[in-house]
Amino acid sequence: MNEVELIARLVPTLPRNDSVVVPSGDDCAVLDLGSSDYILFKTDAVVEGVHFTKAVPPEKIGRKALARCLSDVAAMGGKPGSALVTLALPKDFDPNWVEGVYAGLNALATQHGVAIVGGETTINPERVLISIAMLGTVGKEHCVLRSGAKPGDAIFVTGSLGGSITGKHLDFEPRLEEARWLAQTFPLHALIDLSDGLASDLRHILKASRVGGELLSRAIPISREAKLAARAESSAKPPLLAALTDGEDFELLFTIASKDAVRLLDEWKNRFPQLPLTCIGRITAEPGLRLRESEGVRILNVHGYTHFEKP
Amino acid sequence: MNEVELIARLVPTLPRNDSVVVPSGDDCAVLDLGSSDYILFKTDAVVEGVHFTKAVPPEKIGRKALARCLSDVAAMGGKPGSALVTLALPKDFDPNWVEGVYAGLNALATQHGVAIVGGETTINPERVLISIAMLGTVGKEHCVLRSGAKPGDAIFVTGSLGGSITGKHLDFEPRLEEARWLAQTFPLHALIDLSDGLASDLRHILKASRVGGELLSRAIPISREAKLAARAESSAKPPLLAALTDGEDFELLFTIASKDAVRLLDEWKNRFPQLPLTCIGRITAEPGLRLRESEGVRILNVHGYTHFEKP
């Protein structure tokens, strides 16, 4: 049994209660606790040797740990509220290093109005593990799931993709403001943040929405880093493949009725002139993910870098 | 710098926002997110080799991980709502073992009406780490902090203390129903759950409330396990010391105006006839923690088993 199979077996056994609007399976759990907004609830962990190396400055590690959770709140159209920090450390940890982690984390929290309301320091003898638990809120009418994509929708992505490992994975900006503006201004059908890679994350939308998709290869915005890496090293991924499959872009991927696409591009340019927004394809009734290239259409069966999956 | 000093340095730097009612430092963070109740927010981690061994059945490990968080919700007078599970595992994990963890966790969640709304499975190559993030609610007028103890208060504890390591730490019942009944029926002044040991946890109340306390040595309810351990092994702690300092009892410790003490004991016996409730001392204006024994009063400077502390 692999992890995906295991999770498929575990999820149906999880207990629910009346407060649960969306259980596991989206970017955040969605709860109705009696206020006018929904509550968003999420955890995310980074592990030394998996998500960062010892060489990374502690400020960037703390920042990344929090930023990943913020990106998940963005992926619901939500506003982050408070976070708890679990820091599992070897016994001989350096207090200055821990202060560095918190400095990076606190700075990003302050930038987004997030309160750090405690947490825990515990022992993990061999390596550092940081888990963030995050609470956010979202207006009930503005909460965007993965499951609402419809045949004919235009598929959009922010920013440019690929090569995050060269640096962006440590200092990306979670697209909170952009996602909130989108969810409040346009009737988005489906929304996700790019953590596993464009192809993988789009598949999450397609699966949740029971639809298919077609990407236009020449429309996909490839990052400068992905292009440079391909030029510098013959063994590197071709840039298009990097943009399709590299993880940790933390851009927004969403679908919207095609009739709204032109107005969206127009208003976006006025509102966020610095950040590209690109239409990269469309949702189809036919299942599966296809890539339209100048030579024709082919089935896209490459996978993004798959972490251990989430239940 | 030790952990306590580190945390003392970190806590003042943590960002807050308007939703925070009680930040770090109590059993749960308390948030006001616009509903009629406060939101309780807590995380707690258990680590292989620290909080459990490989020999413990996975069902008991999952149960313990969740039960610790439930006990923290009880310690606010609250009702648990939903939880997220972070499971960090070596790569070659056994899926049946993971299913066992979830079986124990799900059973306890179901018992208390808690929804498991997802989480994450990630890699920790050398050992298992399970972190639970918990949300609960508490009526605004029934939320009990550590900081309200007043000179003259009677100090009460549920159950019997000491020797939890012989088994109770794996199958204790979080005192949710009892704590909710107490908080809704009596004006409790301060409440905490016993995780570090009676002396340590009472010190948390004394420090937060800026008062002192005096315990009556012959009133302290000593568990059968602590007595048996002392009899079986000459090197074991004396039973009274075990009751004062052993961790993971997960009983309730609280203070209440002495005028309410008799009525409390009376009503408790009707409501919870199976679970002892004992008055073990009183809160004093004079700072410090003292133990009144037949020979006289002495300063109590023994410490409970101190985990790595919480920020």
Image: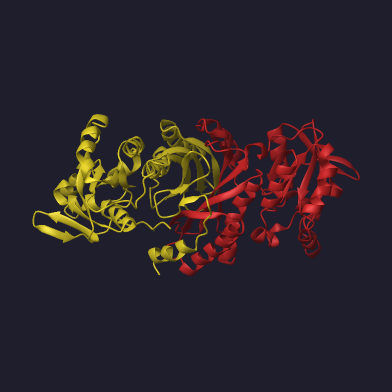
Chain colours: A yellow, B red
Relative to B13, residue A225 above or below: below
Residue positioned most to the right: B295
**Residue B287, how many percent across, how many down?**
77, 32
Residue farthest left in this picture: A295
User: Image check: A177 left or right of A228?
Assistant: right
The answer to which of B210 and A126 lies nearer the viewer is B210
Q: Can you see residue B27? A: yes
Is residue B54 in view from this perspective? no
Q: Is residue B109 left or right of residue A282?
A: right
Q: How many numbered badges does the structure rendering display?
A: 0
B280 left or right of A243?
Answer: right
Q: x and y percent of residue A282 in the render? A: 21, 51
In the rendered image, residue A182, in percent from the top left (x then y), is placed at: 31, 38
Q: Is residue A176 left or right of residue A34?
A: left
Q: Is residue B222 above or below residue B262?
A: below
Q: Is residue B22 above or below residue A249?
A: above
Quadrant location, the N terminus of chain B = top right
Of the 4 image quadrants, the one containing the C terminus of chain B is: top right
Coordinates of residue A109 in the picture (x, y in percent): 44, 35
Of residue B135 and residue A169, the one placed in the foreground of this image is: B135
| Residue B85 position (above or below residue A136) | below
Observer-nearest of A160 and B236: A160
